[in-house]
Image: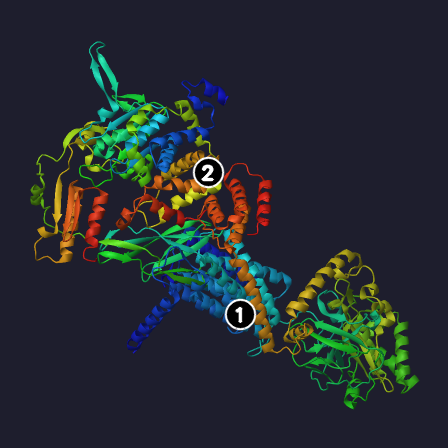
Amino acid sequence: MQQLIDSAAPSSPAVSRLSPHEQLAAVINAAQRVILGKERAIRMALACVLARGHLLIEDLPGVGKTTLAHVIARLLGLDFQRVQFTSDMLPADIIGVSVFDRDSASFRFHPGPIFTQVMLADEINRATPKTQSALLEAMEERQVTTEGETRRLPEPFFVIATQNPSHQIGTFPLPESQLDRFLLRIELGYPDPAAERELLAGIDRREMIKTLPASLSPPQLMSLQQAARAVHVAPALIDYVQSLAAYTRAAPDWQAGLSPRAAIALLAVARAWALLEHRDHVLPEDVQAVLPGVIGHRLRPADDDSRKVGADVTAARLIEAVPLP
Amino acid sequence: MARRDRPVSQRQAWWLLAAALGAFLPLTPHLPLWLALGSGSVMLLRGWITYRQWHLPPRWLLALLVIAGTAAVGFEYRTVFGRVPGVALLGIFIALKLLELRAARDALAVVLLCYFLVLAQFMFTQTIATALVAILTIVLTTATLAAAADDRPAPQLLLRRSGLMLAQALPFMVLLFILFPRVQGPLWGLPQDRITATTGLSDSMAPGSIAELSQSDAIAFRVKFSGPVPAQSQLYWRGPVMSRFDGRNWRATRSMGTQSTPPYPLTGASVDYELTLEPHGKPWLFALEHPDAVPANSQFSDDLQLLSREVVRNRTRYSLRSYPDTQLLFKDTATNLREALALPRDGNPRIRAAAAEWKTRHGDDATAIVAAAEDFFGRQLLAYTLTPPMVLDDVIDGFLFETKRGFCEHFASAFAFSLRAAGVPARVVTGYQGGELNAVDGYLVIRQYDAHAWTEAWLPERGWVRIDPTAISAPRRIADHFVAAVPAGEALPFLARANMSWLRDLRNRFDAVANGWNQWVLGYTPQRQREFLQSLGLEAPDWQQMTAVLAVLSGAVLLVLTAWILYQRKQIDPVRRAWLNFTRRLAKRGVQWHDWEGPQDFARRASLALPTHAASIQAITESYSRLRYAPQATPADLSHLKNQIRQFHP
Amino acid sequence: MPFTLGRPLRQLRLQLHESFVRWALRVRVPEPAPVVLSQRRVYVLPTRAGVAYVMVLVVILLGAINYNLNLGYALVFLLVGLGVVTILHTFRNLVQLSLRPGRAESVFAGEPAHFDLTLENPRKELRSSIRLFIADEDPIEVDIPALASSTATLSQPTQQRGWLAMPRITIETTWPLGLIRAWAYAAPDLRCLVYPAPAASAPPLPWSDDSAHGSTRDGSGRDDFSGLRNHQITDPPRHIAWKAVARQSDGPLLTKLFSGAAAQRIWLDWQLLPPDLGVEQRLAVLAHWMLDAEAAGLAWGLRLPGQRLDPGSGPTQLAQGLRALALYGTA
């Protein structure tokens, strides 16, 4: 049955007969050829897609945020739109507008760039809160409502937003309530010296992306997403995730603990991670691996002194404080 | 602190009322009716107040009620001191205290009063039933104490917790009971108002007084023979000796012990036994004829009664050795012999005439006169009955010549009279004859209906000789049981009826339990404690030794209880237990597992540290991860994991 | 006479108690989390009720001896056993309890500080009636379900700004019978940031300085009104369009939307304050201003000698500003 669907899938690339794990391995390998020395970030991004969440990449300009987003879109064989956010941008610039059409004497909707499968929202913190919230509402509901009409967004729909570190002039940092809509937040960081040398020596990445073949088709991606949801979570592991969340709620280290939604997100990403690890069940290691990405934008340290420590350190502290049940 | 002033909640008020009722109700039969009703209605009132959530009465009213109650008790008993008046006052106080439940400390006072009322209960009765009721009261009171501290839990939960804690307290109770150095009471004054036994022999004997006892199946005493039980006809338990006769009643005259060693020489075989005497409020003790020594704190009077220095107020146990074949052959005083001849000046002319005739015929030959008297009694065809007809004047003549029906006291009285009239010194001896062997515990039980009276006559060459005139007319009374001697159709005590054998069997069993209770719980006296501890190997148990043993054993019990109570019953998942076992083995080799570390991370680390074992570490971790985190693990997987770990020796 | 004697005795008692507590605690203060009440640090003594109980037992024992009541002995021995058992139960109710410091929300000086403690019960039975208190404060009582945790919030009045460490606490219980008290001391690692109390009255917000930063006060309103939308629970209440709501009686709440990029900026500057004000008074005024500015929805910045906080608004900005004030001069 599975094979039947696979063969029936349109524009099925050569990888169609591969197992889910092999499919994913192929995607990762292809991505690594373009983005050097960032396997972890690639895997996290992929996990985010598999868990049907949106990704927030936070780092300085020029470390390859856009490239990563672009590569992901290409490899997954998805439509791609890139929107550079600015402070004069209006919600309609993203969602679309209705224009009066003289011929039909009626309003016609011109869809905005959001009607795509992968949208890269570059420098989202440059937009005004109003525009930000328009985007985030669309992300959450996977649909857009204008002038009383609701339009569904394509499936799959996936937003990769990038954000410069806050405290830059002229930015509107996303409030915590909005940040929660991103399943994962990752930091790219500078490439290590070897990777950077290769980057400098190699051909232009943008050119590479243009020629990058798709490794997956949308139906394959959706069945992989299905597979991620089916990864088994043992009761002991649920206890573990609950303990982690409970610990953040009680401990004085953070201003507020993880919400139940965050705990669900953690479990979803851990499932996707387990799938990437070629496993049909989640291990505590999976949870621990994705923990920095899940909690980095959700937990705010209570002590401002520790604001500078990264998500990895925070996650490590949390992991070591909570014994496995 | 503030908590002591915390008001008493409605729920707590119900608890306290229940506990007070529980402690007070068993006492009511022993209290005057007005008090039982008065305190009872105050408690009912308290219940109504709690139900309606009314205000409590003012303090001055309670003070007045306390004064009135105390005065009433003083009026009833002529004193407010002593045991019964004290208990009565407690009964009043607890009821009135319930009307003064304002703060936590009042609740505590009620609870402590309840515990005290349990003790009060024991002053009246200490049967097994009392103990059972007391246990219920204590459980209820302890639950109330818990409710006074925290009234939120459901009643059944508090009761269960109270029961559990008391069950845990039991070992301490047993240890302390056995080993706590006992002191013989009383500590102060003599408890004058100690309740006395209601049935039993008295120091006088009128016609009908023993027949009355024959209707009671209350236990007089129990005997445990160390050897076989002697024949029924030998079981004469000697009690009060009556020498003074006023024409109707016989009276005992001796109330003083004078000698500790028997004046008579001992002959024949001996019988060893231990006798447990129920309290009867009189000084005399009973012994099988005839003992070779006196029990502690007692002496022989000069008519050979065993008299205790004090009235037998408690169940008393003593061991004796008796020689049934012994004859009371010794030189008795002239006073005694003279007294044993005294008769009222007139009355009973017919037997006097008969006696005078024997005297004329046999002169000074006392033995012959006794034989003549026996012969005379045999020829009179006297009948043994529980319901002899009433004779108003000349009771001896009336019995011997007119009604010819009597119970043992008629026979003994008439026989002693006729011997005296013939010039042979004679007296009436009362006591018990026979007894019933309880097959369950091997105790011979002597009940009040075994009470008997017989005669002793002084024969110069043989001393005092026991002659049982009842045996002449009703030999089965002596050889068998008094029931056998009684004509059919007469009212018998319930348990004495022959067709009630199954009931008697039941009674025997119950009685064996009660006897064990009496022997070991109620009869655990300082002396018994000493004997028991000696039998356990403590050579000379003094209080230091007992305290030391007590301390050691209590410590042990405490340790066990502490371990039990503090033991964290962690029900570790078997898979996890196996894993912990595995990590312990690795920890010994210096690879410590952190409790937050995922299994595969740990396996990687451990493999790096111990490369030679990498394969088995990986395999075990794989099994463990599958069992704990993967779907559909089977018990076989678990045993496989356990096997792997068992074979793992890093 | 009792007064002259009582006072030194009370003093002595307090001193003795204090040195006992210090000895009993004998751990590094504050303690690292979690604080586990081990066997060695739980103390047990009878309560007053317990003493009364013992006295009643003595009386019952005397009665039993005097009247030779063996069941009286049994009664008193059973109750002695109960007394011993209740020690264990009370002890067990407290021992192995673990305390984890929770949150302590920042407060203004003068308000009570609230310290959250999470009490964890690793045992499979409920722990009932655990009381916690700080020195002379009222105790609070919690139950901790089996294998679960409960939160207790202890309050302590504050006077000074700065960090307020959670004082030593006493954890005690007399459960189940109230005859025995088991207690332990603990000093969990928890501190509360106390902000300076805002001045009761303060000068108006220092608008004058604003011009230096390129923004002027706009009398007609700071933002351009751009429309209405349905109110969401996260919208600030001051943006609710009350007038519009009033017009359509049963409609939903509406939120005013504003366009216009920059909110107005205002600098709250230590130097602006009159020179005769003391440090604490200055901080009090600054705190007052901050609350005003935040309430007015302004973007505000803070300048303290040697410190600067860039303009901004919102809870994070307020927290940072107040924190700077609270810790000013404490290095």
- Name the residue type under label 1: Ile
Q: Nearer the viewer, mark 1 or mark 2?
A: 2
Secondary structure of the residue carrying tag 1 is helix
Q: Residues within 10 Å of mark 2 (few under 14, many from 20)?
A: many
- Mark 1, Cα crowd under 10 Å, few <14 / some 14-19 / many 20+, is many
Q: Chain of mark 2?
A: A
User: Residue at left 11%, top 35%?
Assistant: C221
In the displayed orientation, state which residue is furthest to the front.
A201
Q: Quadrant of the C terminus of chain C?
A: bottom left
Between C29 and C129, the one lying in front of the other is C29
The answer for how far apart the CA atoms under marks 1 and 2 are is: 66 Å
Is residue C318 left or right of B25 when viewed as pictured?
Answer: left
> Looking at the picture, how far across and down is residue A295, in whole percent?
34, 41
Asked if badges 1 and 2 are on one and the same chain, I answer no
Would you identify the image quadrant in which residue B263 lies? bottom right
Mark 2 = which residue? A282
**Rendered-image quadrant of the N terminus of chain C:** bottom left
Position of residue B246 relative to residue B604, above or below, is below
Q: Are marks 1 and 2 in contact (CB under 8 Å)?
A: no
Q: Quadrant of residue B283?
A: bottom right
| Outermost residue, right side | B361
Q: Secondary structure at mark 2?
A: loop
